[in-house]
Image: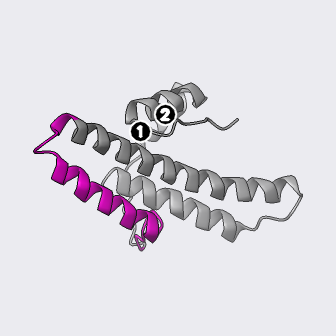
Amino acid sequence: MATKYPETLSTAELASAANRETNRDEEARQQDMQRPARQDNESAGPLLPENFTQECRTRWDNVQASFVDEPRAAVQKADELVAEAMKKLAEMFANERTKLEQQWDRGDNVNTEDFRVALQKYRSFFNRLLNV
């Protein structure tokens, strides 16, 4: 069941929703943390669509410009912008996984290449997120 997010979203709300939906056990998390970081020479393309990225940059410029006059509002808007970008990124990964799951559910043969490409996207994002 997908979580419904309000019109404006904060990083705290996003984190809270993610915590409620997480079913991953502690042992698996510990194993992931103990794995050595891997550096790949893969191409790091854009994480988000160009139009969304441009919109975010414009909004960020406005947030920054408003800081002097309204610092509290600027921080709130910055938080909302970060939350929206995180939500968009999560939606993109969820959509890719849904496509694969629909193929599995139909009984379609999902080839190894499809899995490899999906895993490369996850690995690239994960390494970039951890600044590896």
Picture disc at residue 106: none
- Residue stretch rendered in magenta on the structure: 43-72
Q: Is residue 76 left or right of residue 9?
A: left
Q: What residue does disc 1 label?
A: 33
Q: Is residue 53 magenta?
A: yes
* Residue beneath disc 2: 29
For label 2, count other residues whose C-alpha is less than 10 Å away and answer few (under 14), some (14-19) or many (20+): few
Q: Position of residue 127 (x, y in %)?
A: 39, 56
- Please rate how many residues cluster around mark 1, counting C-alpha atoms within 10 Å: few if below 14, some from 14 to 19, many from 20: few
Q: Are marks 2 and 1 in contact (CB under 8 Å)?
A: yes
- In this view, the residue farthest toward the left is 68
Quarter of the view holding residue 114: bottom right
Q: SS of the residue at dot 2?
A: helix
Q: Position of residue 30 (x, y in %)?
A: 45, 32
From mark 2 to mark 1, how far is it between C-alphas?
A: 6 Å
Of residues 56 and 88, the one drawn nearer to the viewer in this rendering = 56
Does 72 sit left or right of 27 as displayed?
left
Relative height, residue 35 to residue 114 (above, below): above
In front of the other: 36 or 19: 19
Q: Is residue 51 magenta?
A: yes
Q: Is residue 47 above or below residue 101?
A: below
Question: Which of 29/73 is in front?
Answer: 73
**Residue at the spot x=49%, y=46% of the render?**
87
> Which residue occupies 51% across, 26% down?
26
